[in-house]
Image (cartoon, grey):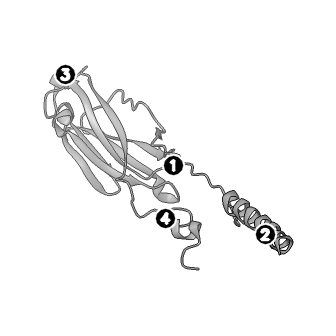
Amino acid sequence: MAANRRKILVPLATLTVAGAVAVGSGASFTSTTASTTSVSSGIVSHSNDRTALDITNIQHGDTITGSVTVTNTGTLESDLTLQATAADGTFVNPDLNLQLVSGGTTLYNGPFQDVETKGIMPVARLAVDGAAEKATVQFIVTLKETTDNSNENKTASASFTWVTTQLEGDSTIPFVGTFTDALGIGR
């Protein structure tokens, strides 16, 4: 009978050890994947087709028009503004007039030397594609027809700063794929 017990106990002990090894090894099916996330910021930049508009030999009654076209060269839609940062002159004020016009909208119309007091002038929204990516501002300078010799041999100048500012961030931009898609939830 002892021999029978050994015959039963040895295989039983072997199964117990094998079971403990299988449970202890943590054997189970697995699957792994990897993903990356990359982020890049946009660019706000623009270019002007002119850096100076020079008018010489203006006479009483003359109206001279020039323009500056600003192009969005960045990757983000932006708002374009214009500001006179300096203006002075020796013309009798208000005999020399400056008018700034963009897209049919008058941004400024008044004495040339006073344009600096206007402050920041909204010009246009610049898209990054299509015809809306450019804005043109006309500079219309007029010397009054009724001016006299007091405006002979006079000068005036103004400096301007063009600024493009990105639009507010858009929280509705979709992430490429969704988190639940990446995890396979709901399939």
- Residue 90 disc label: 3
Residue at image point 56% right, 70% down: 181
Tell me which numbered mark, 4 or 2, is placed earlier along the sequence: 2
Horizontal side of residue 42 vs 81, given as left or right = right
Q: Where is residue 124 in the image (x, y as percent from the top left)?
A: 35, 53
**Tag 3, which secondary structure?**
loop
Q: What residue type is labelled 3?
A: Thr
**Residue tagged 2:** 9
Instruction: Please determine whether, in this image, residue 82 is positioned above or below residue 7.
Output: above
Location of residue 115 by image quarter:
top left
Tell me the crowding category of disc 1: few under 14, some 14 to 19, or many 20 or more residues within 10 angstroms, Cα based: some
Tell me which numbered mark, 4 or 3, is placed earlier along the sequence: 3
For the C terminus, the quadrant is: bottom right
Q: Where is residue 68 in the image (x, y as percent from the top left)?
A: 41, 41
Disc 2/disc 3 C-alpha distance (Å): 117 Å
Q: Where is residue 141 in the image (x, y as percent from the top left)?
A: 28, 39
Instruction: Please determine whether, in this image, residue 160 is positioned above or below residue 136.
Output: above
Disc 1/disc 2 C-alpha distance (Å): 78 Å
Q: Nearer the viewer, mark 2 or mark 3?
A: 2
Q: Which of marks 4 and 2 is in front?
A: 2
Residue at image point 34% right, 53% down: 168
**Residue tagged 4:** 174
Disc 4/disc 2 C-alpha distance (Å): 65 Å
Tell me which numbered mark, 4 or 1, is placed earlier along the sequence: 1
